[in-house]
Image: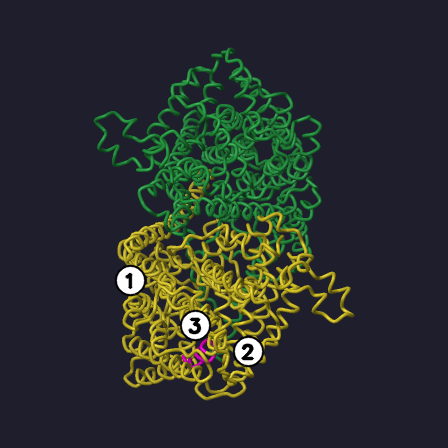
Chain colours: A yellow, B green
Amino acid sequence: MEKLKKYISVKDEDHFYHQGAVELLIFNFLLILTILTIWLFKNHRFRFLHETGGAMLYGLVMGLVIRYVTKSSDVESGIVYECEKLKSGPSTLLINVTNHVYEYQYKREISHHNVHGHQGNAMLQKMTFDPSIFFNILLPPIIFHAGYSLKKRHFFRNLGSILTYAFLGTAISCIVIGVIMYGFVKAMEHIGQLKQWEFHFTDCLFFGSLMSATDPVTVLAIFHELNVDTDLYTLLFGESVLNDAVAIVLTHSISIYSPKVNPNAFDAAAFFQSVGNFLGIFAGSFAMGSSYGVITHLTKFTKLCEFPMLETGLFFLLSWSAFLSAEAAGLTGIVAVLFCGVTQAHYTYNNLSPDSRMRTKQLFEFMNFLAENVIFCYMGLALFTFQNHIFNPLFIFGAFVAVFIARACNIYPLSFLLNLGRKQKIPRNFQHMMMFSGLRGAIAFALAIRDTDSQPKQMMFTTALLIVFFTVWVFGGGTTPMLTWLQIRVGVDPDEDLKTKAASQTASNLDKNTTKAESAWLFRIWYGFDHKYLKPLLTHAGPPLTSTLPEWCSPVARLLTSPSAYGDQLKDGDTDYIINNDELTENYESSAHIPVPAQDRIGSIQATGKEDIQEGDLGLGGYKLQLQHTAGQPQNNSLA
Amino acid sequence: MEKLKKYISVKDEDHFYHQGAVELLIFNFLLILTILTIWLFKNHRFRFLHETGGAMLYGLVMGLVIRYVTKSSDVESGIVYECEKLKSGPSTLLINVTNHVYEYQYKREISHHNVHGHQGNAMLQKMTFDPSIFFNILLPPIIFHAGYSLKKRHFFRNLGSILTYAFLGTAISCIVIGVIMYGFVKAMEHIGQLKQWEFHFTDCLFFGSLMSATDPVTVLAIFHELNVDTDLYTLLFGESVLNDAVAIVLTHSISIYSPKVNPNAFDAAAFFQSVGNFLGIFAGSFAMGSSYGVITHLTKFTKLCEFPMLETGLFFLLSWSAFLSAEAAGLTGIVAVLFCGVTQAHYTYNNLSPDSRMRTKQLFEFMNFLAENVIFCYMGLALFTFQNHIFNPLFIFGAFVAVFIARACNIYPLSFLLNLGRKQKIPRNFQHMMMFSGLRGAIAFALAIRDTDSQPKQMMFTTALLIVFFTVWVFGGGTTPMLTWLQIRVGVDPDEDLKTKAASQTASNLDKNTTKAESAWLFRIWYGFDHKYLKPLLTHAGPPLTSTLPEWCSPVARLLTSPSAYGDQLKDGDTDYIINNDELTENYESSAHIPVPAQDRIGSIQATGKEDIQEGDLGLGGYKLQLQHTAGQPQNNSLA
């Protein structure tokens, strides 16, 4: 008898176990289908469906099947047990059932109104995975990859505009969506649709902040494939990367805004607390991420590059540690990992062995590819498998209206303001394209699914999901026609604009513009500091510290400078640097303080251009990664 | 008030969440430490501590710290609640505690005597992760990588011996350990140490089967670094890879052996059921794995290789699907993924684009590296954080004795038998080295931790853990001295023996030996079939099917043959093949039926040799991966 019972319990566990396998197998199967479909599309040069859109579509179909074909199997759940002995919910619970002790693990708190959802279907429950998986497993590689693969030169050239769109634009978008939604909510309350839910202005702002994270992955993939103008690409990419960070922190700050007395009245103390929280968390995460990026530079002093596997392992673990440390410290891991990626690309990448550079690049590319498709596939699934959807047509309609108005209020006024300062204006058709590229994606979804306890939050989640679907499919699919319609140049050589500019600069160096003098001054200080001190300290590149530091520092300087820095000071080490000296001079019209030999200037332009292609290449386009180049070329002098 | 409660609940969740981050951060930190230490050791050419040993050591120290420094925080757990309403343990439990509904997820059944272990320390609980993680996440990449990186030529040359050691050897080892342990258990019962535990002969056999999985990762790493004789390397590697598969299935079969009447008496029906189960599961997993490997060959007909990222993704997902399908079908995923790896390496690898070959290789290398270190690190941790250790000195002593006797009964008699048939004998010092290399590692640990419900199983787990520690540190550390002491040649060029052999063969082709005629006959049939039909069907290599299939099949054959197969039939396509024709002839002394042009013979030997170095290279040794070679050389003809 004892044996038999044990046998049954083993069988039971096996059942649980195999269910997990089936569930993962379904995901695998969906991803395989997606890959095959996308290959078919790519092969026939259909560009209206990106792999993320395909993943979403298959997820949707599978969700439909699971929802309506599988049967309810677990009759016990859905029943709430009373437990008078417990005072609070412990993390593990031991329960004695007919002389067997079972261990249960705390999962979450459920609102009363959610208890009798579709809890009965075990398959649905299994397919609904923990929201924290998004933030801990799936998003970090995507965000890190974005940071690690920023086209540095173009990014820093447009830094001012990108920061404006990312910070000011996201704030505008958040407030506009919040205000419009509050109007709709008030109207809904008026016609009695909201049945005494608590729906404050902060909830509307919360929705606004989570809907402000744009994710134009589909658009960017097409831009990349068609070689759309690099400045437009960089503006969009930079904006979307940074605005994710801003939106995540903003959402967190809004969610902790809790006025003491009346939730509808404005509470200055709570407001400033939230603002302080935003600034603190953003700055803290930035600092945490960058310092991990800088810590990795310690590889400079080791000969770790002789063991590429150890080096890759260390790189991977330190990058992940940046994320985890930020989380453990109560900051935002995603933001930390983004800036860690940017710092790694800027400093650490130079210290890596050629083998590790390629390994890390390919590894993160692959992880990004997989994670992105899993998220989009899951989004498709969630439409049918999520058990507490609240579809409210008026709210959904309001959200669509709000999102588009907010995008317009973000792009057009800011572009106008930026064009006042920019020498190279953002043309009208670029602005329209940016307006059009306000797709919502993984971050908005992850932020929305994080909190689905209350009914307003569930309604927001449903609405966010629908907006993601609509924008990814309709706008994502319409990118190529839109490009034609707006007459945006495609097939641009990333170096071309640079070359013409260099030529025009040599021809006429007259037109002086001083509107940006201040920013140029700031930027030049940072550039000089980075070039003279940080680069030599953290990498093998740049001039030796012995020549840049004051003389009394020379013993320390000699210790910290890489031996390879002496040989070829300004020769090649700086070619992948954020900006070339001539560009700096040209963009900000101030006399260059750092002399660059003429022949090096050309060399560096070419080298940077070449690297750019590979950096932005997701391995999906027509390009093949030119391995020898990536591996050996740009830094071979400094490694010799 | 409502707000406040909500705020507290958010805080609570945050707390849970950050704990997870801290826990992962500890792991990251340990792995980083391990990498740095190992780098230091490698730099100074200390070979007595492999990274896995280092990871284990750091894990041990951290476990000690967590165990004795962190405090008990969760007072609620450890209390068992009675629940009369429940009939069985449902998968999720909703509990109403003071008007809050909490959802709990089923974790496991706990034996009554384990309830009052060290359940109180939340940190310990958090660090003890689910055993199924080993089987679902950590082991598959390790095992797949082993299959994918088999040195094919040498492996198939020693296939007979490897299969003998793996199947017969594991069975011998299992039975010998079982019998010896049963003796010890009886003795312990006699002196009253076992307090009425149920401890049957099958339990002893269970222990025997799980302790039969050898894992000489440390030894192999040193062998690789020092270029120890390739045959010895292959024998050990092949044995350890296959014997893992055998041990896993054997353990499962023994665990389901349940005689109906008296658990101590022999029940023929149950025995044959177990044997049938073993054969069924092994064959099923083999078939499942191989068929996934073959499915991947479909890439032959697509132009997927133009999109390396899609190709890599597909490859990865299909390999993982092999694992999941086997699990879902009630077979053994690990065995399936092993044979999937072997098949992929044999067929699919030829179809991949050069870029994907490198990507997949590096990806799996990296995953292997990470997973291996996590497991060994966790083993170190488990010694102090596992909450139900039972240390029994007599049992532990018995296990040590049994493991060594069993290893001896496996290696020496089987080597003697094999030497009767082998032309190239396994010398005495190789036998001693194999005896010495019977390290236990990840698989034994994973099998032991899978079931720790009853007290005998807990005692087995503790004992297995100690044996792993001892063998990895003592034997792993003693590998280099042992090699010197046994006078085993190091610094062997993998091609050298081949060249001498080829030379000696040309010189005197007299010595004919017919003891292995039968096996050669079998092997030749398989070789011919594979070369003529499977290779051309599944890859771009080999002769075109149109020339190997009978004439009436020619329409089908033309459809299935890759266009590139026509040009260069026997030229280069087969260089990475399992065995060369001349080796086949030489090893099994039968006239070769497949003619090979003389100049090709030399070419193929060289090409194969070159590939070998890279295949076995874990990226940790002194070699750098020669990218151009791996990528382009061996198959460039067939890809052209």
Q: Secondary structure at mark 3?
A: helix
Q: Which amino acid type is shown beneath numbered disc 3? A: Leu
Q: Chain of mark 3?
A: A
Q: Position of residue B357 (x, y in %)?
A: 45, 44
Q: Which amino acid type is shown beneath numbered disc 1? A: Phe
- Magenta residues span A165-174
Tag 2 residue: A279
First-in-chain label (1 vs 2)? 1
Badge 3 and badge 1 in a common chain: yes
Give residue A235's mark. Answer: 3
Badge 1 and badge 2 in a common chain: yes
Q: Residue at x 44, y 19 (%)?
A: B519
Tag 1 residue: A48
Give residue B638's mark. Answer: none
**Viewer-nearest of discs 3 and 2:** 3
Residue B260 seen in the current view? no
In the rendered image, the vertical position of residue B242 relative to residue A503, given as above or below: above
Residue A113 seen in the current view? yes
Q: Is A173 part of what is drawn in magenta?
A: yes
Q: CA distance from mark 1 to mark 2?
A: 40 Å
Q: Position of residue B105 (x, y in %)?
A: 45, 57
Q: Is B594 part of what is drawn in magenta?
A: no
User: Which quadrant of the figure has residue A224?
Assistant: bottom left
Q: Residue at x 40, y 65 (%)?
A: A442
Give the side of residue B420 with respect to residue B522, left or right. Answer: right
First-in-chain label (3 vs 2)? 3
Q: Secondary structure at mark 1?
A: loop
